[in-house]
Image (spheres, rainbow, N blue to C red):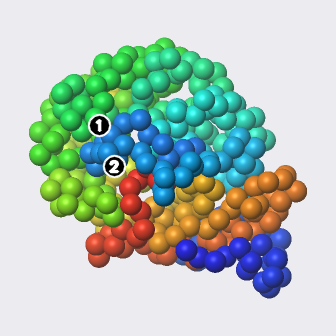
Amino acid sequence: MWQLNQSLDGGQGAAVPAPSATGLQDRFARRFGYLRLSLTEVCNFRCSYCLPDGYRPADGKRPGFLGRDELLRVARAFVALGTTKIRLTGGEPSLRRDLTEIIADLAALPQAPRLALTTNGYRLQAQAAAWRQAGLAQLNVSIDSLDPREFALITGDSRLPQILDGLEAAWAAGFGTIKVNTVLLKGLNDHALGNFLAWIRDKPIQLRFIELMQTGQRQAYFDRHHLDGTALLASLLNQGWQPVPRGVDDGPAQVLRHPDYVGELGFILPYSPDFCASCNRLRVSASGQLHLCLFGDGGIDLRDLLQADAQQADLMRRLQQALQHKARAHRLHQGNAGVREHLASIGG
């Protein structure tokens, strides 16, 4: 874990300049306008690739996640430094009872960022309209199979019909294209491409295939179920799917469109060459740690600077200087997943 508190906040280290107008930029001239803000590590699903035994607090301690005021201060600092998109993640963020209020808090910020939410969808049917009214602009829903039995096998949950009804409720509430995340799993859902394509033919869905990523607790699972997504991507390009240019605040997905389909396809392929060259996103965990990479070796504590509005300038300085430690790329190709035990700990 890096010991940056003293050197980055102007306390006992060298004098720190005021936040510059350059915003959030690293040594490699990459600019970061996209924040993934985790609200909780807790999840109520038991996905086989993430938390097959369910969520368990570290050391058995009751977790202390960021409160509304702390979350707002994080978001305000990022927005002041040029962030234009904030994605609320988990765990499962809808487990927080104050999720709607958090969305409204962030939507009320001056120069409000585009707000997105990644969810397993179990509360979508009941809450989609409230989230939309509060200011949520975009939804990502995790659906790893369209077959109820297969879905239950992968996720440990049997609520696929309710989640699909939730998509209908979200469209009725005014959400446009909904992104659906599907982790590619060899031997589990890799046979179902035809069903997925039929599903998006007449629906405003961007179906995003995510290549399984290595984590510390799931090495044997990774070895058994990892599927290289580049072959599937190449096959679809040969079938008339066309690549779409990436937007400024878009994530890492390579998006494809086809004239015969209302829906789109996306591919997130972390093992592809130069995956990190276009990185534009930073992560703050539910406990207030800044993570420069999903697969980095540690986090930088922000929580001591989230207790009062008067600390905002110091918080912005810490964010800017921390970025000078960001590596050029992850080390997944060398079999090094950093300290990440599972993706629920940081929101993926």
Disc number for residue 285 = none
Residue extending farthest bottom: 14
Work out whether residue 86 or residue 100 is closer to the camera in this orientation and state it: 100
186 displayed left or right of 128 = left
Figure quadrant of residue 104: top right
Work out whether residue 13 or residue 58 is closer to the camera in this orientation and state it: 58
- Amino acid type at circle 2 is Cys
Asked whether residue 93 appears in the rendered view, the answer is yes
**x and y percent of residue 95 in the render?**
52, 33
**x and y percent of residue 44 in the render?**
41, 35
36 displayed left or right of 181 = right
The CA span between labels 2 and 1 is 9 Å
**x and y percent of residue 133 in the render?**
64, 21
Work out whether residue 346 or residue 253 is closer to the camera in this orientation and state it: 346
> Which residue is tagged 2?
50
- Secondary element under disc 2, as helix, strand or loop, is loop
Asked whether residue 34 appears in the rendered view, the answer is no
Sooner in the amino-acid sequence: mark 2 or mark 1? 2
> Which residue is tagged 1?
155
Residue extending farthest right: 310
For mark 1, does the 10 Å Cα neighbourhood hold few (<14), some (14 to 19), or many (20 or more) residues?
many
- Amino acid type at circle 1 is Thr
Residue occupying image coordinates x 65% and y 52%: 83
For mark 2, does the 10 Å Cα neighbourhood hold few (<14), some (14 to 19), or many (20 or more) residues?
many
Work out whether residue 207 or residue 315 is closer to the camera in this orientation and state it: 315
- Secondary element under disc 1, as helix, strand or loop, is helix
Residue occupying image coordinates x 72% and y 35%: 105
